[in-house]
Image (tube, grey):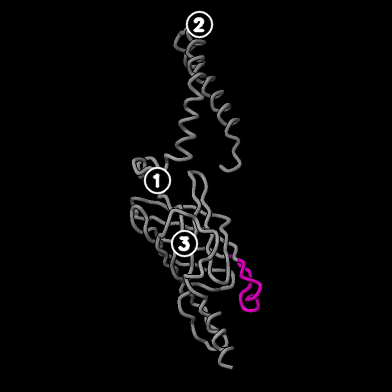
Amino acid sequence: MKNLNTKRFALALFAVFAVCFLVVAFGKGATVSDVWGAISVAYQTIPIVLAVCAFFVSYAWRWRIFSGWLVPFPDLNGTWHGKIQTTWRDPSTGVVPPPIPVMLTIKQSFTRLSCVMRTAEMTSHSFLADFWLDEDEQVRKLGYSYRSSPLPTVRDRSQPHEGTAVFEIVGNPATKLKGVYWSDRKTTGEVTLDFVDRKQQDEYLGSLGEHPVSSKNGEDKKNQ
């Protein structure tokens, strides 16, 4: 949808409608003047329909009145804070680190969805994201694949990588995301996030806390 030329698509849709309309009208014995008058009215109506559609796609899809029956997916726009519990073990100690503070920002429109996850050591951007919704099976999930870019200062132990995260959407409206991730570094883990604000933060907040591995390394250096 992001590469769709809306104007051309609308004109093509009208052309298809006009041809089908002519076939049905003449098939029922309508006169040329009747058909031309009807097409003229239809053509004048198109800008109004497009304006209504544009307003809906830009703003109104978020309104709760449309939730469920017309808009099947929830509005997850905003900033989410939480923790990552990795299964990775520190090769020097064999110990699994404590939970990692994390921030997720979601930018969502009616046709697009992107996710950016940040910790004190890395930023990951989604390149494929979508919902998995099945009311009959009671499934409400968000899934996305991502590319992660750790800070240059930690790349001796944390290389750039790709992975996938899948979250269960909790609440209506959504207030919590609970899920798992796995990556091509053969790491896995659990992620829990709570909704914070509709504003999308573009920088990791230091108040959330340091990465536990970085914090531990800093303490070790102090004690040397």
Amino acid beneath label 3: Val
Q: Which comes sooner in the sequence, label 2 or label 3?
A: 2
Q: Given the current orientation, which residue lies at the most extreme bottom position?
A: 224
Q: Nearer the viewer, residue 141 or 121?
A: 121
The residues bearing labels 1 and 3 have C-alpha atoms spaced at a distance of 18 Å
Residue 151 covered by magenta stretch:
yes
Image quadrant where one finds the N terminus: top right
Secondary structure, mark 3, is strand
Label 1 CA crowd tier, 10 Å (few <14, some 14–19, many 20+): some
Identify the residue at horizontal 57%, vertical 61% (top origin): 146
Q: Which residue is mark 2?
A: 33
For disc 1, the marked residue is 72
Of mark 2 and mark 1, the one earlier in the sequence is 2
Please identify the quadrant where the C terminus is shown: bottom right
Region in magenta: 149-162
Image coordinates of residue 157 in percent, x first then y, are 62, 78
Closer to the camera in the image, 210 or 189 = 210
| Callout 1 secondary element | loop
| Residue 64 part of the magenta-drawn span | no
Lower sequence index among marks 1 and 3 = 1
Rendered view: 83 above or below 213: above
> Circle 3 is placed at which residue position?
166
Question: On screen, 177 above or below 47?
Answer: below
Q: CA distance from mark 2 to mark 3?
A: 58 Å
The three-letter code of the residue at mark 2 reads Ser
Q: Is residue 168 left or right of residue 94?
A: left
Q: Is residue 90 above or below residue 15?
A: below
Between the residue at mark 2 and the residue at mark 1, the CA separation in whole angstroms equals: 43 Å
Label 3: how many Cα within 10 Å (few below 14, some 14–19, many 20+): many
Rendered image: mark on residue 206? none
